[in-house]
Image: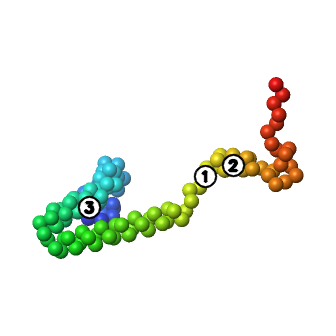
Amino acid sequence: MALGEPQAVIAAAVGCSLEDLTARFGVELLYGHARRRREVVGLMFAKARTGNATLIKELHDLTRLVAAERAAEGEQTAATPARLGKKVEAQQAAETAGVGTEWGDDLGQAASLN
């Protein structure tokens, strides 16, 4: 029904508020597009298997496009290293505190007094 329409337009068409729409149909709004796309691609595959050359080419192009998008996403993810948490950063800083300074030996582990 929505076909990419903004949620406010969908709410107006259904006759409810935007808040009511998101409360009652949150899952459908979140996953509806993917489900519809899966259905359409399934229909395209079925027709392509019957020998429809246009749909075979369309599916080929679609597959290449999705592969290129995923490769681009992978490059972006690889280019941005994951940030460590504050506690992990503090622990790593504490482990190397004083290394290469005259205070380095003083900051090491204290000898056990037992």
Contact flag, marks 1 and 3 (Cβ < 8 Å): no
The tag earlier along the polypeptide, 2 or 1, is 1
In the image, residue 103 above or below residue 57? above
Closest to the camera, between mark 3 and mark 2, is 2
| Colour approach in the figure | rainbow
Q: Residue at x 26, y 61 (%)?
A: 37
Closest to the camera, between mark 1 and mark 3, is 1
**Quadrant of the drawing holding the N terminus:** bottom left
Identify residue for label 1. 84
Residue lying furthest top in this view? 114
The tag earlier along the polypeptide, 3 or 2, is 3
Relative image position of residue 99 (x, y in whole percent): 79, 52
Q: Which mark is residue 92?
A: 2
Q: Residue at x 15, y 62 (%)?
A: 46
Identify residue for label 3. 37
Label 3 Cα neighbours within 10 Å, binned few <14 / some 14-19 / many ≥20: few
In the image, residue 86 above or below residue 77? above
Residue type at tag 1: Leu
Residue type at tag 2: Gln
Q: Nearer the viewer, residue 30 or 52?
A: 52
Relative image position of residue 42 (x, y in whole percent): 20, 60
Task: Note whether residue 20 is visible.
Answer: no
